[in-house]
Structure formats: structure tokens, C-alpha cells
Amino acid sequence: MKIEDMDMPKQAFAFAAIHMLSNRLQVVGDKLDPTISSKQWLLLAAISKFTDTPPNIGEIADVLGVSRQNIKKMANILQQHGFLKMEKDKNDLRSIQLFITAQCRDYFKGRDKLEREYMLKIFDGVDDEMLAVLCNGLSKLIKNADKILDGSTNAQR
């Protein structure tokens, strides 16, 4: 039986489907390239979005919604592979900044076509209007989850 065939309220279906999709995207993403996992890719993508100053472990943990320990563990692995460098912040020696290496940039330039093809396959049949609705809905769900994490009881329904 598929989840689409189960009789359940739309909110329950959406909640379950998001989790199932997340798991499937991780499995498919991990098969895309044996060198780097989908979670490691997401970590590097998040780091690359910080253009002014390199982020620290805590900032990336906050962006991705995971623990600092998980970020540090992945960062250590990526550092061993030469994809990033960890350095103590010169202004705050307790903070560890994350830097993407030239080796990492070169590696991802080499898999640019692979990533574009992957995105086309994942979003096959999803038009611009549907994608806009999806992005808006996911943004709202992320904000609501953040409110719950922050202890707010006013998450809108």
C-alpha cells in the first residue's frame, strides 16, 4: 500500500509525506555520487551561501536545524577529504569557522551537469506555479517549526 492510497486527513498526509520524501531524497542523493552524501552536500551548500564572512559551526547548525555536534562531525569528515577547512575564529577563539576549499569548488564544478540533471528529474512535471506554492508552504512550515522550537505557542494553523 502507498501513502497516497491511505485514508487520512490532509495535514497527516502532508506531515508523513514530507518525512518520507526527505528519506527518499537522501537515499537518491546518496546514490548520485559515492564521494559525498546528500547531507554533506547540503552542509557545503549552506556554507557557500555565506558570502561576507565564513560561518561558524553554530550558524550552520541553526540554518540547517541540526545540532552543532552533527555539523562538527560532518565538517571533520569533509575536512579529511579536503572539501573544507575549519579554523578558530580570530575574534572568538571558542568559535570554529568553516571555509570551503578550492578543491571543493573544483569538485562541484565537475559535477554541475550531474546536479542539474538530478534537479530536472526530481522536479519533472512541477511547473513554476506549483513550485511557488510548494516553496511558500514549506517556508511557512519551517517558520512554524521554528516557533515551536523557540517555545512560542502561537504557531498559526
Image: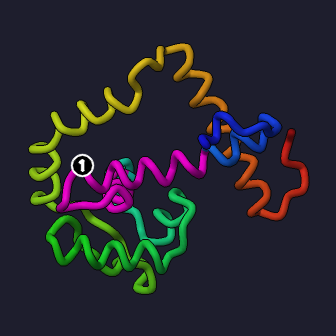
| 37 left or right of 113 in image | right
Instruction: Tell me where residue 134 appears, x and y as whole percent.
Output: 59, 28
Compared to 3, does 37 lie above or below?
below
The residue closer to the viewer here, 68 or 125, is 125
- Prevailing SS of the magenta stretch: helix
Instruction: Tell me where residue 155 appears, x and y as whole percent.
Output: 84, 47
Instruction: Tell me where residue 149 appears, x and y as whole percent.
Output: 74, 63
Mark 1: amino acid: Leu
Which residue has dot 1 on it?
A: 32
Q: Is residue 149 magenta?
A: no
- Range of residues picked out in magenta: 18-45
The residue closer to the viewer here, 141 or 100, is 141
The residue closer to the viewer here, 148 or 58, is 148
Q: Residue furthest front?
A: 1
Compared to 88, does 113 lie above or below?
above
| 31 left or right of 74 in image | left
Q: Is residue 23 magenta?
A: yes
Q: Quadrant of residue 115?
A: top left
Q: Residues within 10 Å of mark 1 (few under 14, many from 20)?
A: some
The image's colouring method is rainbow
Number of numbered callouts drawn? 1
Residue 53 shows up from this direction = no
Q: From the image, which quarter does the C terminus lie in? A: top right
Q: Quadrant of residue 38?
A: bottom left
Q: Residue furthest bottom?
A: 94
| 87 left or right of 1 in image | left
Please report the residue visible at 56 percent of the width from the left and 18 percent of the height from the top: 130
Please report the residue visible at 62 percent of the width from the left and 38 percent of the height from the top: 138
Q: Kindly state the secondary structure of the residue where label 1 is placed.
A: helix
Instruction: Tell me where residue 117 appears, x and y as whole percent.
Output: 24, 31
Q: From the image, which quarter does the N terminus lie in? A: top right
